[in-house]
Amino acid sequence: MKFRSERDALIEMLATAGRAVGARASSSPVLSGLLLSCSGNVLSVTGTDLDLTIQITEEVIGVQDGTCVVPARLSTDIVRRLEPGAVTFADDEDYITISAARSNFKLRTYPVVEFPAVGRTSEVMTQLPEAALTEAVRQVVRAASHDDARPLLTGVLLSRVDGSIRMVATDSYRMAMRDLPGIDALPGEEDLLVPARALAELQRLPSRHAEGDKDGHVGVAASSNEITFWQGKVQISTRLLEGRYPDYKQLIPDHYPNRLHLGKESFLAALRRVQLLVRDNTTPVRLSMRPGGVDLSVVSQEVGDASESVDGDFSGEELVIAFNPAYLIDGTEAVQGDEVILESADASRAATVRGAEDDHFRYLLMPVRVS
């Protein structure tokens, strides 16, 4: 195998596919590598950890067809540090030579036969609007759990509700829920439980509209145990999570007697300032809701205390409620628009953060009990 490409294009390919590599411990060294496959003037780079697979295809100057498996992190770092310009990859049995200008590297490769069988399929079952999907993923994945001991909560539920696609994620402390109105084109008939990690990688991709696709769409295909997304020249495949997702609907209160309406940026800025005194996850931020706004306070036994007031409109009974500040900031950041509404029933039940102009996104957050 031998091909030539511009350094910056190669960096993007190697780094994108490399995000699927090495996140999970593996006894197989070949899983720390990237599969490079050159056919004509087309190069395909694939990374996988068996749960998540990322494949990207670009045009290069092909000299000799072939495949090889290169060390993912090392080859990416080498290409990133080369001088701008053309970079040549040449495979010679057990080695790959990477050369550019006056730089020359020779690296051991992994056996191609040991790399998992992954293929590129063209069977797109449905199309989803890229902009709407990317924004929904941004809002929702933040609430998914990172604890592999509770695998179901590391996923995002995709389901059809009232003619819309609904995306839900929860780590049991907070829950994010986003509806995509007018869009219900999910592949298959069943709900899908997609690992949040795969959706996060999809969100990170730059907008790369396919030829003739001016509005930008993401192709989706699903089987009984796998889902695949196509965006531009990138294909992301992941195993679906198996099991029954928690009944999230019972967590949503029927009504809220207390409603606080604030400017999003002023509220966020105040939260970030008082958060400076938080040194662990057990220190909450207290919100004292009152007519005219809210008073924020953080009390840290080791550091000191901080307080700040934010103007706003409040209706209901005066209330003191406490939250994990990082979670509250997360939910407020996810809101679209310039204004945020915080709705609460009392200091012990879940509160909701949502936008004043957009009712399609809701972020539920459990309060922290304080003395």
Image (tube, helix red, strand yellow):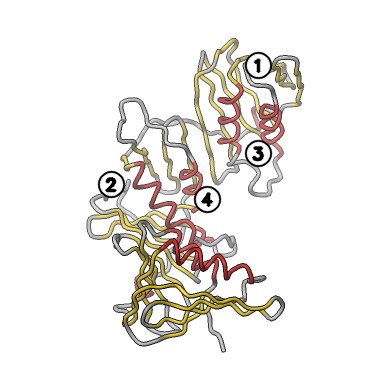
Q: Earlier in the sequence, mark 4 or mark 1?
A: 1
Q: Is residue 342 above or below residue 89?
A: below
Q: Is residue 55 above or below residue 176?
A: above
Is 316 or 129 nearer to us in this picture? 316
Check if mark 2's residue and mark 3's residue have beta carbons within 8 Å: no
Specify the label residue 185 is tagged with: 2
Q: Earlier in the sequence, mark 2 or mark 3?
A: 3
Provide the secondary structure element on which disc 4 rests.
Answer: helix
Marks 1 and 2 sit apart, C-alpha to C-alpha, by: 43 Å
Q: Earlier in the sequence, mark 4 or mark 2?
A: 2
Residue positioned most to the top: 63
Specify the label residue 31 is tagged with: 3
Picture quadrant of residue 332:
bottom left
Residue type beneath disc 3:
Leu
Instruction: Decide: few, some or many residues near mark 4? Use Cα within 10 Å; few <14, some 14-19, many ≥20.
Output: some
| Tag nearer the camera, 4 or 3 | 4
Provide the secondary structure element on which disc 1 rests.
Answer: strand
Instruction: Decide: few, some or many residues near mark 2? Use Cα within 10 Å; few <14, some 14-19, many ≥20.
Output: some
Which residue sits at x=35%, y=87%?
317
Residue type beneath disc 4:
Arg
